Image (cartoon, helix red, strand yellow):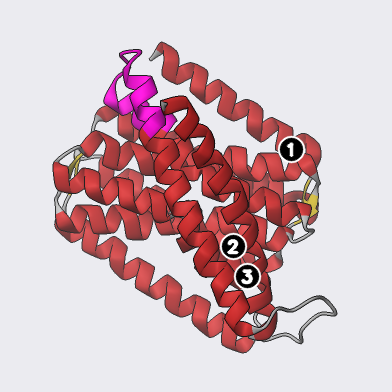
Amino acid sequence: MEYLLLLIGFMLLIKGADFFVEGSSSLAKILKVPSVIIGLTIVAMGTSAPEASVSINAALSGSNDIAISNVVGSNIFNGLVVVGICAFIAGFSTNRDILKRDMPVNIIITAILCFMFIDGRLSRIEGIILLAGMAAYITCMIISALKNREEAEDCKIMPLPKSLLYIAGGLIAVIFGGNLVVDKACIIAANFGVSQNFIGLTIVAIGTSLPELVTSIVATRKGDSGLALGNAIGSNIFNILFILGMSAAIQPLHVLSESLIDCIILLASGIVLFLFAFTKKTMSRWEGAACILMYVGYTAYLFVR
């Protein structure tokens, strides 16, 4: 039964993501907002809903290992696998705003998180600081959207009610499917006797990142690489600033020494991804393949750790 429900969860993720991307892209055209802004905000926060649910509930129940490892593991997966697979499917030009603003912000806040992890805990005050950073980032996005309104392209635009229905219905399917995948994957993994931290970094992290993966792949196949890359980077920023910020504000989190190492690996992967995107202002297929191989190497490291 667990395997059947796992399959149903994957199906909900795929179809939900398809509807979500269509609705979001249509809404961007209606509002004359660049799709990259929609990807960095609405889509990024929507696809990060499973991570938020898992980490905040874990913090409330005192499962610190899951709360932290879920976010760090998800961000490593987003940067290396989500972007890597999208680049491997179809190499794309990197958006100038993402290169100048969002990728550097992602690196800076990851470095700040590493610094916060050094003392072995994430306090309430540090959580509030992260939440304040999220408020500042969203404000910056809104200002950018207002300054950079663009004319609608010659493409199919759905009516506003239908666009909103697609977004809402797709988001519900993505969240429900993501939670179903995580729950059943955890049960299957627990039967093999692996640790909670390992489950958080792998099964839960990958499971909660499936919405980002599927949404970005669907966007890439539709030729909207701005939405794909913006979704992955925006989700990483949202995961650190909002999810860890909210989790720590609710309940201070104990940080394992292993989590600090994983955060340093996350920082290194963010820098590598930025260098790949910065060179020639494109992400090529071989760079995408390199990102995927780096994640395979990271997973191998987790197994032997």
Query: Viewer-proximal residue, 165 or 22?
Result: 165
The amino acid at mark 2 is Phe
Pointer 3 or 1: first along the chain:
3
Give the labeled residue for mark 2. 20
Residue occupying the point 81% across, 80% down = 153
Side (left or right) of 154 relative to 24: right
How far apart are the alpha carbons under marks 1 and 2? 28 Å
Mark 2 element type? helix
How far apart are the alpha carbons under marks 3 and 1? 30 Å
Give the labeled residue for mark 3. 23
Side (left or right) of 136 relative to 149: left
Q: Quadrant of residue 245?
A: bottom left
Residue occupying the point 65% across, 34% down = 291
Query: In the rendered structure, which segment of residues is drawn in magenta?
Result: 184-203
The amino acid at mark 3 is Gly
Side (left or right) of 252 relative to 165: left
Q: Residue furthest right?
A: 154
Please report contact status of discs 2 and 3: CB closer than 8 Å, yes or no: yes
Q: Main secondary structure of the magenta part?
A: helix
| Residue 199 lies in the magenta-colored region | yes
Is any part of residue 217 visible from this angle? yes
Near mark 1 (Cα within 10 A), the count class, few <14, some 14-19 or many ≥20, is many
Q: Quadrant of residue 2?
A: top left
Mark 3 element type? helix
Query: Viewer-proximal residue, 244 or 173?
Result: 173
